[in-house]
């Protein structure tokens, strides 16, 4: 489908707005220190296993993350490149700096020092914010992050609800990462079971939101 430069610009800006919202949620999640998100449990496991087997000092968590992301993109380029868009690159490049910004902004709140009955609701709120931001990114139709593409592509190909597929994919990330030596906490399981269903709830809402913004700004 041909799109004008103006429409692409609006879609990319919507994607970036969704990315900022999503990573605010990720930051709240991480600052509670109740576990990593499912994808990063897998990355952590891959990092620990590859480091112990190879002894290569240049391997880092971040480099493994980039390598896995690039592998996902490569597989999609060879199978169905329609999923790879400018937003995929934006998500890869901007995600880390956005988390760093929110971490610096919110660190004075010392969320990890709060009582557990307070930290769990904050973590759950972070998951909800993450799910909403993620659906804005998806419905911008300008691309999305490689790790999110895994569930999106599988959902599209097998014609099953995204919320269910996302939950299964996240659980696979957790189990695979744990078997490889990654660690997880209560927050990891909350994230795995919460983000998918909440994203499924927000998808039609975000679609209407994106279409409304496009309609008004294109007029």
Image: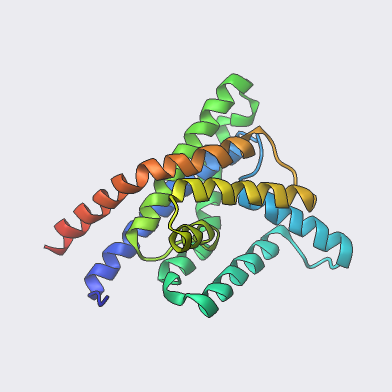
Name which quarter of the figure residue 4 lies in: bottom left
Residue at the bottom extreme, as displayed = 78
Q: Is residue 218 above or below residue 200?
A: below
Q: For the N terminus, which image quadrant?
A: bottom left
Residue 114 percent coordinates (x, y): 61, 23
Task: Let me know if residue 55 appears in the view.
Answer: no
Q: Is residue 186 above or below residue 164?
A: above
Name which quarter of the figure residue 69 lies in: bottom right
Residue 98 percent coordinates (x, y): 50, 53
Camera-side residue of 83 and 13:
83
Residue at the left extreme, as displayed = 219
Residue 83 percent coordinates (x, y): 44, 70
Q: Is residue 83 above or below residue 97?
A: below
Residue 127 percent coordinates (x, y): 50, 39
Task: Let me know if residue 162 appears in the view.
Answer: yes
Name which quarter of the figure residue 216 lies in: bottom left
Horizontal placement of 178 versus 114: left or right? Answer: right
Horizontal placement of 98 versus 132: left or right? Answer: right
Q: How is the image coloured?
A: rainbow
Q: Residue at x 52, y 76 (%)?
A: 79
Camera-side residue of 168 and 58:
168
Q: Residue at x 45, y 44 (%)?
A: 131
Q: For the C terminus, which image quadrant?
A: bottom left
Q: Residue at x 75, y 53 (%)?
A: 45
Camera-side residue of 50 and 19:
50
Q: How many marks?
A: 0
Q: Residue at x 35, y 48 (%)?
A: 203
């Amino acid at each position: 489908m041909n799109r004008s430069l103006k429409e692409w610009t609006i879609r990319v800006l919507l994607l970036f707005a969704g990315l900022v919202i999503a990573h605010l949620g990720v930051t709240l999640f991480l600052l509670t220190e109740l576990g990593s998100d499912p994808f990063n449990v897998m990355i952590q496991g891959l990092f620990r296993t590859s480091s112990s087997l190879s002894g290569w000092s240049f391997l880092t968590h971040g480099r493994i993350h980039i390598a896995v992301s690039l592998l996902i993109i490569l597989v999609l380029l060879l199978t169905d490149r329609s999923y790879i868009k400018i937003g995929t690159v934006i998500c890869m490049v901007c995600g880390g700096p956005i988390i760093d910004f929110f971490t610096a902004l919110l660190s004075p709140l010392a969320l990890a020092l709060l009582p557990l009955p307070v930290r769990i609701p904050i973590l759950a709120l972070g998951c909800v914010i993450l799910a909403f931001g993620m659906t804005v990114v998806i419905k911008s139709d300008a691309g999305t992050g490689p790790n999110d593409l895994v569930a999106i592509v599988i959902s599209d190909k097998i014609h099953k609800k995204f919320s269910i597929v996302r939950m299964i994919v996240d659980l696979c990330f957790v189990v695979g990462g744990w078997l490889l030596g990654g660690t997880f906490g209560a927050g990891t399981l909350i994230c795995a079971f919460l983000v998918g269903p909440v994203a499924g709830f927000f998808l039609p809402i975000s679609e209407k939101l994106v279409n409304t913004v496009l309609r008004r700004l294109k007029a």
